[in-house]
Amino acid sequence: MTSDLNELMVIYPDKLWLEISDQAQEHAWRLSKLKSYSHTTASWNAYLNNLCLHIFLAWLKEDPDLRETVNVWLDDEQLASVWEVVNGTMLTIGDTKLVLIPSDKSNFQELRIPQEWVDIPNWAGNYYLAVQLNLEERWFGVWGYATHQQIRKDAKYDSLDQTYSLDVEDLITDLNVMWVAREVCPVEKLEVEPLSISSTKVEKLLEQLSKFTFYSPRLDVPFEMWGALLAVEEYRQRLYQRRLENQKNNQVECSQMKANNLSQWFENIFEVGWQSFDAVISSQQKTLAVQFRTDATLNDPRVKGAKLIDLGMQLGGTAVVLLLGLTSELDEKISIRVQLHPANEEIYLPPHLRLVLLSESGKILQEVQSRNHDHLIQLKKFKSHPGKNFSIKIAFGDISIQENFVL
């Protein structure tokens, strides 16, 4: 047990603190490797969730007062299809549904719950636990919990990454309160709007979402369609298996990716996954909004669009936001500014993150790399004629994500 863990137990005695042992880490890693995943982010997500689940279950089993059977909501095969695309795990204790949301961020300030665990009827839980896994200091901490009703009433919804978030200060810190509430109060009846999708749309949706990517496709279609697809076990398993097949066959080449039509941005029409800058501001990205607005080099572009980019484990679990600003010039060219910002109220970008401008043929035209404590990185402003193609690549090590554009 590290001194830091001892200090946490003294400073926050009402919270749950546990040691992460070598055995727990080895067990979680072994379990995560028993299943295949289509990209490294999903593999790391499986490891974190296996580790969180193993430690929490071991702690529960040591409680002599817990007489009800504790079950993991899904079996191993089903869990793999969940962790392929979303973070989190559900336990059932009697009629109570408990959702564990693990995070390995060192700067833990909020409980951020993927929308799937709140708004898919058969996924929704009664309680949501904010779990921090400090892998460097080797401790497991539960900062508190929130109820489904509290999430619906008080949480901030971020449409950029489709999550609900509550600050740590707004969580109920003492887990004993939850156990007592379960005994003296009836289990809350969850009111969640049903989701549905026609069978005729399923095949088309599966084809779109099963294409090989280095990230989860959860933001690539509207949530109503995505949630309805995940809610059906058969559809979710088919998505999982197809993504594995496409990863093995390496069927997707960046050059074949559909180009984002920037001319439509001037009509406020954005491709799925992209949003207008005003939508980003309204989704609580306050730090990002201040940085973008106060940057004099932008020259107040007429149109601004943003997209959340997640490279998962390679960025320490931190997402980033790709921003493009467009301005029509008198010579009929379009002036373009490209920036990369941290997301989810993070202050700095991860170091060694590369932002690259590519020509239609794939030639590198510009490249910039983040340093320690960079609030943002940006390419030099460039101009292009309508009808021209270019690409923006975000890379970290040998992992990269590419966005193609046409003016």
Image (cartoon, rainbow, N blue to C red):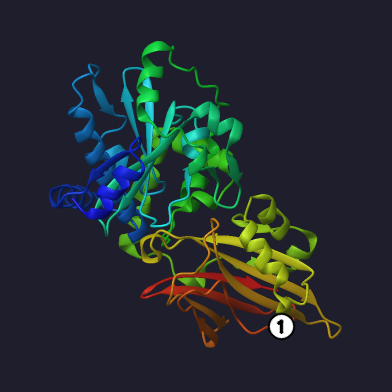
- Report the number of numbered marks: 1
Q: Position of residue 10 (x, y in %)?
A: 30, 43
| Quadrant assignment for the C terminus | bottom right
**Where on the picture, by quarter, is residue 293?**
bottom right
Question: Which residue is the site of mark 1?
Answer: 384
Q: In this orientation, which residue lies closer to the viewer: 97 or 119?
A: 97
Where, by quadrant of the figure, is residue 42 drawn? Answer: bottom left
* Viewer-proximal residue among 84 and 106: 106
Instruction: Left or right? Give the position of 27 relative to 195.
Output: left
Secondary element at image label 1: strand
Q: Is residue 130 above or below residue 401?
A: above
Q: Is residue 340 above or below residue 89?
A: below
Let me know if residue 114 appears in the view: no
Q: Which residue is drawn at 46% across and 36% down?
A: 117
Residue closer to the observer: 27 or 132: 132
Q: In this view, does 35 lie above or below 260?
A: above
The kind of residue on which mark 1 rests is Ser
Q: Specify whether residue 221 is in view.
A: yes
* x then y, percent, for residue 95: 36, 17
In-front residue for pair 221/15: 15
- x and y, in percent, of residue 116 in the image: 48, 38
- Residue 84 image position (x, y, % from top left): 36, 49
Residue visible at 52% across and 83% down? 368
Label 1 crowding class (10 Å Cα cut-off): few <14, some 14-19, many 20+? some
Query: Hey, which residue is sitting farthest right in the picture?
Result: 330
Instruction: List the single residue furthest toward the front.
Output: 10
Q: Give the side of residue 83 with respect to residue 364, left or right.
A: left
